[in-house]
Amino acid sequence: MTSAQKPAQSNTTLNNSRSQHIISGFVSGFASSALLQPLDLLKTRIQQSPSSTLRSSWQELLLADISNAQNTRDSTLKVLRKLWRGTLPSVLRTSVGSGLYFSTLHSMRSYIQTHSASSTTSGTSSVKTSSVLPQIQGYANLLTGSFARGAVGFVMMPVTVLKVRFESSTYVHSSLFQTAKAIYNAHGVRGFFYGFGATFVRDAPYAGIYVWMYEYTKSIAPALLLRSPFAGQLTTVDGASQVLSSPLSVAVNSICAGFSATTAVTLSNPFDTVKTRMQLFPDRYGTNMWAAFAAILREETGIRGLFDGLGLRAVKKGLSSGIAWCLYEEMIRSS
């Protein structure tokens, strides 16, 4: 095989089957969601009321059971069960959603790369990017990330509503079936899609900004690494170009994912707050996203109220993106 053919072969992941991306996305979403569920639960508790804080939510979550516990082991188990309340819908939503999202995103980016003469974003560095994903222009990353996330968000919306209701302390349901029944009895099928407008406006820009920043930071990382103490971790191939070693690639992908997620979360958090309020209190905030925005600004602490739960959401998203995207890329790389 000639050297001219090798660059095309180096992107063998472009031809990976859809099932490989679904499975890799499912596993990465499952792992990150299960590990970080306590942060998601606390974030929901903070956003459900303008008077809620991390400290008050923590005390409400734990103190009653600790005071009634018969011994330390009993209290620890109760604490753990409460912290991981809502794990089933959260894991279902994130694992299935991640599988659909990653496979859809890969298909769209592969199509654009195939039909675009100037798709690469890797620059002129002799070090290849740590990404094993299709390389396309920045604006295309922005658009594909937004579209894929918005479409998958609509499909998974009923599970999202169940998750938020089950995590909240406002509604006391002993099972997901009871939660689903209560939503249907009160609002019909429409109740499972409350807050979709805010969810879409939150998720689509978030994913677009995230994918663009993630790929951009990975594209400039090789040039920075050439001038760093980690230059020795680069492996020369074909006598010219270099690739990142596996441990270094994992570190670069995780750091870029965490940084990109934290930035995108900060910009999209107001829509996350509105979405949570609309899903928990549809009678109060209605089904109009902009009316809900106005109500929060008018009745609460102004702009500050739109950023409730930002700290926890930023930490959770930063960690979950670092875990999910790194695990996903490594599974695709090894497949």
Image (cartoon, helix red, strand yellow):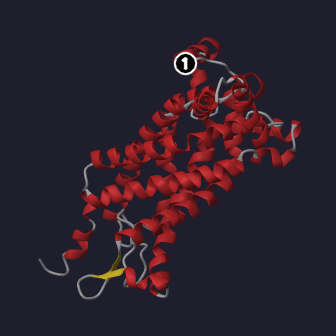
Residue at the limit of the structure toward the top, as seen here = 185
Image height of 320 relative to 229, above or below: above
Residue that appears at 55% across and 58% down: 210
How far across and down, in percent of the image, does residue 3 sit? 18, 81
Q: Which residue is mark 1?
A: 175
Image height of 157 relative to 131, above or below: above
Image height of 55 relative to 237, above or below: above
How far across and down, in percent of the image, does residue 321 sit? 51, 54
Residue that appears at 31% across and 63% down: 114
How far across and down, in percent of the image, does residue 164 sit? 62, 31
Can the viewer see residue 87 in this picture? yes
| On-image quarter of the C terminus | bottom left
How far across and down, in percent of the image, does residue 115 sit? 32, 63
Residue that appears at 25% across and 54% down: 16
Quadrant in the rendering for residue 199: top right
Can the viewer see residue 194 in this picture? no
How crowded is the residue under tag 1: few (<14 C-alpha within 10 Å), some, or many (20+)? few
Q: Is residue 220 left or right of residue 14?
A: right
Residue that appears at 56% across and 33% down: 160
Secondary element at tag 1:
loop
